[in-house]
């Protein structure tokens, strides 16, 4: 009787130990697989410009999401209280996750926007363990991203892989501190007129991540203004003066005609095609 009881006890303990061992092995493996897929994913963050909204990046995101292995997974809103509101879910099987970032206060100054960009990037690093990422911007989000990169980016951050600036005012805005056909590039490649913001960017340009690939898209209405109605071509192309020769690559694309107007550039099929080829091909 004692021998029978001992055998049953041994069998129960052995079964429990086997089950426990199985659980211990299976759970870490699942976790490792989950993390591995997240590490392989390369998210792209989309930022709107001054006074912008979801409409500023909806068309860009929809065009990208039509491609294989590309899908919008999250919308991150920086609320009025400066907290992050997260909507959506990040599926492990998406190779190129798209993340739309919105600012409830869409008229904040560049340093404040840069602080929010930093908050979003560090959130994604902490919660999704991203190893690299891309950023697509429209209008003022371009300078805000550049400012963030030269003031806040750290070697411990995920790699800033690709940066797309669409209609970025890097050296002035028409009706504020720029005039069509007034500015020009000098022999040294710098704009002749440099506003305070550009001078600040230029002083700190060496801090911009060296491994980043940069695509600069700007519009020319072909109406004699050499602008997209708000940003002159010289102002937009001044990004090149800041990064040429010190990043992995730099290229410019001009969009011409009525559809190159500042606010129409983010709803432009030529722009979509150029951005998606740069990011995902």
Image (cartoon, grey):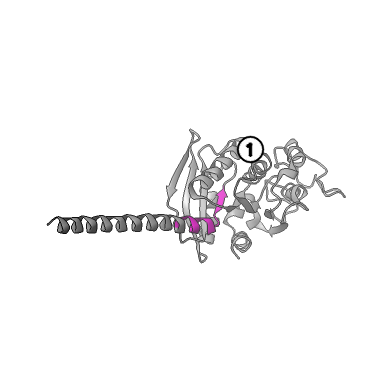
Q: What count of labels does the image hold?
A: 1
Q: Which residue is mark 1?
A: 110
Q: Which residues are magenta?
A: 34-47
Would you identify the image quadrant in which residue 254 lies?
A: bottom right
Q: Residue at x 31, y 58 (%)?
A: 18
**Position in image of residue 64 (x %, y %):** 54, 60
Q: Is residue 154 left or right of residue 187?
A: left
**Is residue 41 at least partly visible in the picture?**
no
Q: Is residue 261 above or below residue 149?
A: below
Is residue 44 shown in magenta? yes
Name the outermost residue toward the top. Answer: 81
40 or 269, nearer to the observer? 40
Name the outermost residue toward the left. Answer: 1
**Position in image of residue 55 (x %, y %):** 52, 50
131 or 133, nearer to the observer? 131
**Position in image of residue 148 (x %, y %):** 64, 41
Q: Label 1's element?
A: helix
**Is residue 132 at least partly visible in the picture?**
yes
Q: Residue at x 15, y 59 (%)?
A: 4
Is residue 87 shown in magenta? no
Label 1: how many Cα within 10 Å (few below 14, some 14–19, many 20+):
many
Name the outermost residue toward the right. Answer: 187
**Position in image of residue 16 (x %, y %):** 27, 55
- Quarter of the figure with the C terminus: bottom right
Q: Is residue 235 left or right of residue 115?
A: right
Q: Is residue 195 left or right of residue 82?
A: right
258 or 25, nearer to the observer? 25
Q: Residue at x 70, y 37 (%)?
A: 176
- Quarter of the figure with the N terminus: bottom left
């Amino acid at each position: 009787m004692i021998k029978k009881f001992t055998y049953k006890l041994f069998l129960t303990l052995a079964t429990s130990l086997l089950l426990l061992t199985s659980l211990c092995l299976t759970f870490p493996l699942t976790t490792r697989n989950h993390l591995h897929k997240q590490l392989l994913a390369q998210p792209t963050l989309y930022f709107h410009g001054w006074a912008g909204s979801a409409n500023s990046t909806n068309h860009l995101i929809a065009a990208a999401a039509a491609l294989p292995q590309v899908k919008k997974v999250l919308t991150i809103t920086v609320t009025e209280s400066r907290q992050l509101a997260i909507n959506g879910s990040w599926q492990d099987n998406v190779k190129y996750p798209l993340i739309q970032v919105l600012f409830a206060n869409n008229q904040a100054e560049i340093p404040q926007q840069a602080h929010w960009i930093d908050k979003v990037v560090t959130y994604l690093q902490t919660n999704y363990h991203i190893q690299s990422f891309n950023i697509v911007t429209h209008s003022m989000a371009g300078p805000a991203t550049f400012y963030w990169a030269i003031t806040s980016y750290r070697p411990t951050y995920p790699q800033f892989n690709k940066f797309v600036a669409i209609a970025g005012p890097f050296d002035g805005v028409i009706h504020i501190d720029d005039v069509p056909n007034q500015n020009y590039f000098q022999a040294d490649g710098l704009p002749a007129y440099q506003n305070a913001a550009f001078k600040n960017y230029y002083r700190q340009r060496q801090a911009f991540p060296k491994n980043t690939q940069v695509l600069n898209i700007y519009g020319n209405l072909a109406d004699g203004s050499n602008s997209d109605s708000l940003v002159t071509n010289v102002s937009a192309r001044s990004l090149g003066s800041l990064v040429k020769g010190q990043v992995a690559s730099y290229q410019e694309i001009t969009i011409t005609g009525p559809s190159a107007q500042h606010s129409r550039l983010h709803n432009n099929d030529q722009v979509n095609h150029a951005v998606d080829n740069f990011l995902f091909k």
